[in-house]
Image (cartoon, grey):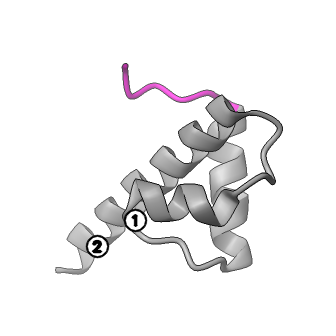
């Protein structure tokens, strides 16, 4: 799959990051944190993956 995400995915991920949930750079952990809060499995996985990518980029910028 490509790296282009829709505005819905980006907006949702950024809003969840601002709320301060315990997201990490692991897709599996983020998926468990989101649980059944998303309307569909596909959207949950996309948001979890996008958050993981943002966290990895954030970690690289700090080093």
Q: Are marks 1 and 2 in contact (CB under 8 Å)?
A: yes
Residue 42 figure quarter: top right
Q: For mark 1, does the 10 Å Cα neighbourhood hold few (<14), some (14 to 19), or many (20 or more) residues? A: some
Going 73% across and 60% down the picture, which residue do you hit? 15
Question: Which residue is found at the position 38% from the left and 28% from the top?
Answer: 3
Front-most of residues 30 and 19: 30
User: Does residue 32 appear left or right of residue 55 in this picture?
Assistant: right
Which one is nearer the viewer's eye here, 42 or 12? Answer: 42
Element type at mark 2: helix
Give left or right: position of 35 versus 24. Answer: right
- The magenta segment is 1-7
Residue 25 place in picture, x, y as percent: 37, 65
At horizontal 16% and vertical 80% (from top left) the residue drawn is 63
| Residue topped by disc 1 | 55
Q: Is residue 5 magenta?
A: yes
53 vs 58: above or below: above
Q: Is residue 28 above or below residue 22?
A: above
* Residue for point 28% across, 73% down: 59
Q: Position of residue 40 (x, y in %)?
A: 76, 33
The magenta stretch spans residue 43: no
User: Would residue 45 appear left or right of 8 to someone viewing this image?
Assistant: left
The image's mark for residue 38 is none
Q: Which residue is mark 2?
A: 59
Residue placed farthest to the top in the image?
Answer: 1
Q: Indicate the quadrant containing the N terminus: top left, top right, bottom left or bottom right.
A: top left
Disc 1 element: helix
Q: Name the foreground residue: 19 vs 49.
A: 49
């Amino acid at each position: 799959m490509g790296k282009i995400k829709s505005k819905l995915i980006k907006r949702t991920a950024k809003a969840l990051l601002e709320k301060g949930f315990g997201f990490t750079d692991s897709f599996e952990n983020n998926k468990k944190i989101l649980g059944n809060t998303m309307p569909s499995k596909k959207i949950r996985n996309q948001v979890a993956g996008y958050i993981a990518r943002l966290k990895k980029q954030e970690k690289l910028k700090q080093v």
